[in-house]
Amino acid sequence: MNVSRRSLLGGSAAAAAGTLLPIRTFSREAAAAPASEGTFGYGVASGDPTATSVIIWTRATPAPVDGVVAAPGSGLGDPVRVRWTVCSDEEMTCPVASGEVMTDVATDHTVKIDVTGLDPYTRYWYQFSTDSDSSIVGRTQTAPDEPGETHALRFAQVSCANYTGGYFTVYRALAERDDIDFVLHLGDYVYEYGNADDRYGPDALAGDRDHEPDREMRELEDYRLRYAQYRADADLRQCHQRHPFITIFDDHEITNNAWADGAENHQDGEGDYAARMATALQVYQEWMPIRMPETGDQAAPHQGLQFFRRFTFGDLADLSVVETRQNRSEQVSSFVLVGTPEVNDQLNDPDRHIMEPEQMQWLKDGITTQRSWHLVGNQVMVSPLGWPGQYLGLAQGSVAINGDAWDGYRHDQTQLLSHMASQPLENGDTVILTGDIHSTWVENLVGDPGTQMDGTVEKAGAVEADPTALVDQPEGTEVQPKNSSELGLEVQEGQIMTTAADASIPPGVSVPLASQTPEPTRLDGGAPAGVEFVCPSVTSDGFYEIVRGILQGPLLSIGAVELAGGILKMLNPSLEHFDGIGHGFALIDVTPERVQADYHYLPRPRIDYPDPRLDDSATTAHASSWQTLAGTREVIAADSPVGERSDEPRIAECVVPSQTPTPSETATPSHTPTPSHTPTPSHTPTQSPEPSVTMNPTPTGDAAPITAAPTASSTPAPTTPSGTPVPTTPSGTPAPTTPSGTPAPTTPSSTPAPTTPSSTPAPTTPSSTPAPTTPSSTPAPTTPSGTPVPTLDPTGAPIASATPTPGPTTAAGGGRLPSTGGPSGTLAFGALAATTLGAGLIARRNRLAGRRQEHADVQERTDESE
């Protein structure tokens, strides 16, 4: 959402104590503190899930040099070699993909991997490691995208999270949910403001949640440190750890009201704007788990950098994520007084765009695809919205629009909405998902927004000021209207510039108005085009905070906001629902029959609890539900919130190979699930090149997965009741086992060597079995099938002489444990080996034993082979 450089709000409540992090007051050192909490102090994140791939992210802080920490943005620190592993279990004992990357100061030591070749609609866990440290384990999942299959689709919609505006308890509420596929973040992930007179947020948090750096971010170091500060927040960090994100930036990731060649919040003396935007977009790519589509299969004609991209979910839905800052034309003004020919000519100018024409064509093409639902992730409001002029200190009967929203780009707005309205029903319905305005809006969209706005102007004369409208409210008093100068507005020839208040919400919205037309009536705006669900902010000031900054009393302010909602609905009959008080998120649930939005808010303000954003123990609760039924292209109230999901993501199988390939073999994975929805491995062994690994963690890099080797036939390898592989003889028949399932003693010439009670392989001859290992020797890194992971030099090139000797395999996953490589340069991963051989392995065995019924068909084939 857009805010001016001066905030009117001064909060009055004290913050409650307690948090998940020991850090509370953020100085520059505190913002960089996670860099001192180990290599991976900024946690992990994942994003942009497709059917077979997902981005995983971390920051790998180098070891301090002479006591100096390589904090984000510092430009300090040596390159770091990082190993990443993706597993099918939370204990990280059954790897399905892994690799190594180098990261350095060029990307602020961030690491971003595009893990490919995964199975659709499947949950995975991932972790990063160095030779001395391991990250926390993150959870992610691939998209429910299988042609001909319909799975559940549910996600959270959020935007506008200002660090100085309050605690990120909304993120904590999302982290605690287990029923969402991803988090859709629609922009204003960070804010650019400093801590002086441009501070944005309640005064009660000053000194407790201050921005770092303490000035407006403009330089590379500023942007990097600001992102680091947000990622240091425990609630946001946990949310990233638990769910993949799909994100797009709005203006505050650059600076307020940004456009192609400037911004409201970029003044003379603040440097070159083009360089500032380039820096902002560079850091966004570094710190966000986003896949840049420019060089992949989603590359499309564009201008500048391509951030717009599309996600598909089988035949059910697609999600087009648009970007509306990098190439937009300059705003006419903050607000625009409509109704005059001159203003209408400006708004309808076909050469003024909110996005480049190439992106508009891409968006329209996506809507013509035959799917049940076309979802559009969008920054600023698409629906026409007329504001009574009195909210801007203007005369009765006047109407203004927000010049930064799609209303300010009428040509593009009409082009999109008329295209949506013209689509045949078999092409599906469109639902716009929007952020920006720090409040909840549920709108019907029509194909002719200009005609709809003409009707709003005709009705505006019925709206008049009513200073006594709030007298009967708690803390009631008369509220007199203010003129434009008193509201800090500059008005000239229909252009209204704000210099002292929030630039998307009129500063005079506290003025009570009344209408001579008590009931809203449907306006003629052409054919239905779809619906728009606008989510509230996480913490950024909304209507309630702006009004309370003037009226002070919490209940009086709530009354004024609710009164304003009634006036807005009367002027804009396509507006079905408005809430300007709650902070939270929208839960979007998609089925073939309907799309439903459940709104969840923090507690409602009250006299003794005027600002729930100051409560770091607050949580969210369901408030209202709205839905659009397939084929109607209109929104109605839903009877109840959504219930349980129709199905759940799969847990990836821990595939056990039936034979150990030689070091020259690599596996070719199969990623097409069977009709029963259970992915199965390919049963044809092949020879293939070593998997490629992106060593420079750039936005376009990706790494192919290293998966378990296929079996030699269509018969799965036999396993014990606990799920561990049954040893086989060279002829392929199962080796004898004890009643507990452990290998029985055999002769060296035909079967595996005897094992100890702990299942540690006994010494064998080099010609037949692995070399002896000691408890302190860490095996060399390999794929789950036993294929060695190539050792890489600092440039990313394979080191030909670094092929490790095959080591022992794990009982749970069939893959080989990593080992020290000595002079070959292969890294030691003691922590990972300890996890694999310790309690995690026991837990994995127990979990596999509990799935015996799920794998009954596999066990039956095993019994037949025996």
Image: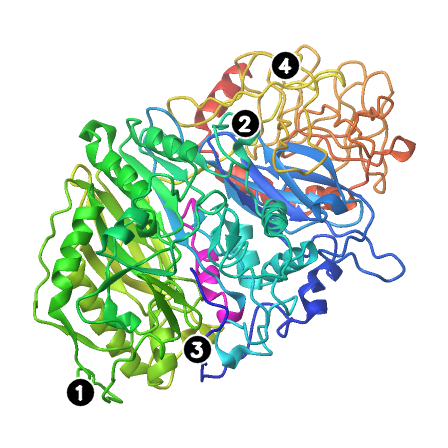
Point out residue 578 in the picture as x, y percentages from the top left corner.
25, 62
Tell us which disc is closer to us: 2 or 3: 3
Q: Is residue 608 magenta?
A: no
Q: Callout 4, which amino acid?
A: Thr
Q: CA distance from mark 4 to mark 1?
A: 87 Å
- Quickly name the residue at label 3: 9
Q: Callout 3, which amino acid?
A: Leu
Q: CA distance from mark 4 to mark 3?
A: 76 Å
- Quickly name the residue at label 2: 296
Image label count: 4
- Quickly name the residue at label 1: 472
Q: CA distance from mark 2 to mark 3?
A: 45 Å
Name, please, the residue furthest toward the right: 823
- Quickly name the residue at label 4: 733
Residue 350 is drawn in which quadrant?
top left
- The answer, for residue 339, to whether it is visible in the render is yes
**Residue 608, placed above or below residue 753:** below
